[in-house]
């Protein structure tokens, strides 16, 4: 998208991802002179997308330089996050703030397309009704825990919900009835892009984002672009076979996949907590490991070993600048780090790992939601003049 | 390189990779009119890089359209291929023909930088001396079985020869004394690019090339570009851990790497032929497997299983259009195909593999050499006007 972005879109994208910026900073980032920035800013102000104001906290003598600030309260998207055991909807403003949110849990199995879409539509309508008068909705984005066809948001494969070829994007669009398409992306793809834009991945154009939930998803940036492959289905790290001998059964039907060995089920089973589930249970194991609980320690060690093998393989393949742990892996990684790092030292080539930083997600539990919001903003950011927003 | 290519370079690159082309075909490929092609061609003819001639085999009535043909006999590079048990040097003409070659075997161990460079320099000088008068040398390229630093051709890591941080590119440049830099690349990287340009990978911009020798190297194209990562060391498929429990020892110091389980040593050991080595021994096992030799069948099955796991993991990660087997894997794959394909069916997601073609290298044993030659031609092809070639 950014390759064909207009100058207006480039400027708007800078303030969207970085927050308020002075004209001088914008001129430097865009490599144009300040009179060009002045003209572009005037046009964006006219469309109600940005305003110019004094920077917050300015005190003392001298006239401070005005900063170009996104109209976050007025210009909004609906963002949805469809995870395994919860549905989230949010109103997200230009610039990225989550202004309002609704969340609901749902049964893990038997969630068919119609049920999920109608629940999401209810949450979406609540957010629209609760939004202040004058809110302009410029897009809708959704993060889904499965393989998504680019273009129409068809869920090709979503093992956790048991979906195959479900027309999720178009059905949600119809149910919401806002006259806006729903841009759907795989949760880890969106997470990678969100962390690169405004999280722990800023500055790392070769980046691997691993999103743990019940499964483990991957989003991989190569030279700043999402690794799509032939059909947009690249980055499937979760089904990398790491344990070829009697590995744990995976929802995909195989055994020994990375997500089967490192996901929530494996962790809780190793810790002897098979009755439990969900993010709080994962956090419980991680916390108990730090206080020396032997079952928790054993579980964290086992998952850390398999995770480290997977990460080592990815480092060899991608020579990345950063590997970012998100979702439940963000909770687990600190306790598992010694095991992960030992495996990387053992199995990743020194030359391949010499520039690889290991980091926790910078956007915490909102990584995928923010990524979904950014998909919702994509049309506006590509060319604000064509997006037809007006006061 | 091609992103900043001049129009002159684009035209020359078309005839370099595709062979003689009519002006009409060039106009269509480049999206420009025929008078532009006429002008560009005239400039290239003036520099002695192409000529216009009647297509070969033209008979019958009517005046045939002239074709633009690379001056392959006159415009040449030196290309080197440094493999584990042999050194190859060749004179390669514009358009890709191997016009002359020299080859030497060498001991597998104890080949230090000085020895290898001096042997290569001898081969190179023989080729220069044997070349016809009027030969114009426009570059030097080299393929090396290890991790290469872009820019200066430093071998960061070459386990098969036991090299770490050896200044191979600059030393070979000095030893040859031709006043031309040596563009060094990893053998599988070069192989991937050569197969994409003129081999089994034409049309597949998301491509995985696997090069078997003693080790297994990978070259991966993502959207037509080589996957480089932070330092240019991406694509290290050979050290993907596939067998975490008591796998075979690898030259890297670890165990159970893809290349340890699928390389020449593993194949010959599984076949009970530990006294043998080299490409002929590999071909012997593959041939014996097709005639039902039980030891050979067992070896091919074992290697095919591990190779299939590696390929399945790569298909999940890259959603490729083609996976190409080169080097000794070209000899082995036909016999091992049922095992490889069964593992792919078992471990690669259906959505990830739906567009993946499995193919044998189209350039046979010259894949890496042709890739090296193309690196040698790169400066000329980027901008023929600046390359300073003249009659």
Image: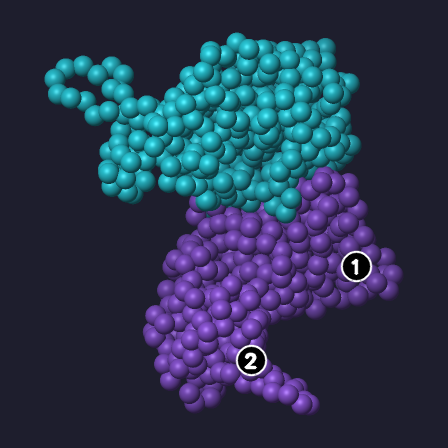
Chain colours: A purple, B cyan
According to the image, label 2 marks what residue? Answer: A67
Q: Of A8 and A175, which appears nearest the observer?
A: A8
* Image spot of residue B105 (x, y percent): 65, 11
Mark 2, secondary structure of its residue? strand
Residues behind callouts 2 and 1 on a single chain? yes
Q: Of A162 and B323, which appears nearest the observer?
A: B323
In the picture, residue A20 is in which quadrant?
bottom right
Residue B29 can be seen, yes or no: yes
Cα distance between the residues tagged 2 and 1: 42 Å
Read off the chain for label 1: A
In this picture, residue B49 sits left or right of residue B177:
left
Identity of the residue drawn at 56% across and 42% down: B227
Q: Which mark is residue A301?
A: none
Identity of the residue drawn at 56% across and 76% down: A22
In this picture, residue B97 sits left or right of residue A306:
left
Read off the chain for label 2: A
Identity of the residue drawn at 68% across and 48% down: A311
Few, some or many C-alpha atoms within 10 Å of disc 2 (few <14, some 14-19, many ≥20)? Answer: many
Identity of the residue drawn at 43% across and 48% down: A231
Mark 1, secondary structure of its residue? helix
**Image quadrant where one finds the C terminus of chain B:** top left
In the picture, residue A175 is in which quadrant?
bottom left
* Image spot of residue A280 (x, y percent): 70, 69
In this picture, residue A3 sits left or right of residue B43:
right
Q: Of A252 and B231, which appears nearest the observer?
A: B231
Q: How many marks?
A: 2
Q: Are marks 2 and 1 in contact (CB under 8 Å)?
A: no
According to the image, label 1 marks what residue? Answer: A335
Work out whether A29 lies above or below B316: below
Residue B374 can be seen, yes or no: no
């Amino acid at each position: 998208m950014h390759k064909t972005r207009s100058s207006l879109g480039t400027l708007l994208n800078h303030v969207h991802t970085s927050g308020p910026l002075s004209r001088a900073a914008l001129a430097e980032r865009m490599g144009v002179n300040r009179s060009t920035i002045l003209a572009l800013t005037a046009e964006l102000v006219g469309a109600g997308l940005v305003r110019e104001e004094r920077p917050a906290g300015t005190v003392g003598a001298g006239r401070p330089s005005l900063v170009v600030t996104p109209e976050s309260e007025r210009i909004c998207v609906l963002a949805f996050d469809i995870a395994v055991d919860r549905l989230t909807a949010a109103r997200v403003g230009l610039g990225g703030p989550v202004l309002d949110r609704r969340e609901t849990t749902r049964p893990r199995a038997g969630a068919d397309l119609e049920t999920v879409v109608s629940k999401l539509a209810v949450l979406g309508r609540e957010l629209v009704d609760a939004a202040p008068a004058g809110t302009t909705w410029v897009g809708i984005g959704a993060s889904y825990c499965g393989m998504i066809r680019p273009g129409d948001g068809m869920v090709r494969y979503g093992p956790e919900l048991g979906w195959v070829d479900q027309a999720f994007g178009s059905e949600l669009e119809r149910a919401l009835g806002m006259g806006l398409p729903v841009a759907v992306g795989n949760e880890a793809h969106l997470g990678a892009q969100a962390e690169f834009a405004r999280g722990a991945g800023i500055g790392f154009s070769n980046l691997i984002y691993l999103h743990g939930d019940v499964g483990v998803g991957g989003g991989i940036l190569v030279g700043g672009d999402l690794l799509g492959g032939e059909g947009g289905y690249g980055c499937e790290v979760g089904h990398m076979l790491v344990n070829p001998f009697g590995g744990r059964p995976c929802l995909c039907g195989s055994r020994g996949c990375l997500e089967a060995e490192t996901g929530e089920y494996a962790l809780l089973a190793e810790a002897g907590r098979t009755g439990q589930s969900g993010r709080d249970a994962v956090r419980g194991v991680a916390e108990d490991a730090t206080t020396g609980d032997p079952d928790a320690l054993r579980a964290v060690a086992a998952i850390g070993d398999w995770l480290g093998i997977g990460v080592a393989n990815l480092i060899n393949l991608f020579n990345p600048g950063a590997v970012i742990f998100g979702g439940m892996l963000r909770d687990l990684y600190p306790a598992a780090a010694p095991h992960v790092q030992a495996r990387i030292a053992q199995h990743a080539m020194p030359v391949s790992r010499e520039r690889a930083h290991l980091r926790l997600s910078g956007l915490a539990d909102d990584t995928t939601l923010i990524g979904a919001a950014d998909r919702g903003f994509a049309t506006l950011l590509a060319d604000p003049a064509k997006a037809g927003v007006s006061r």
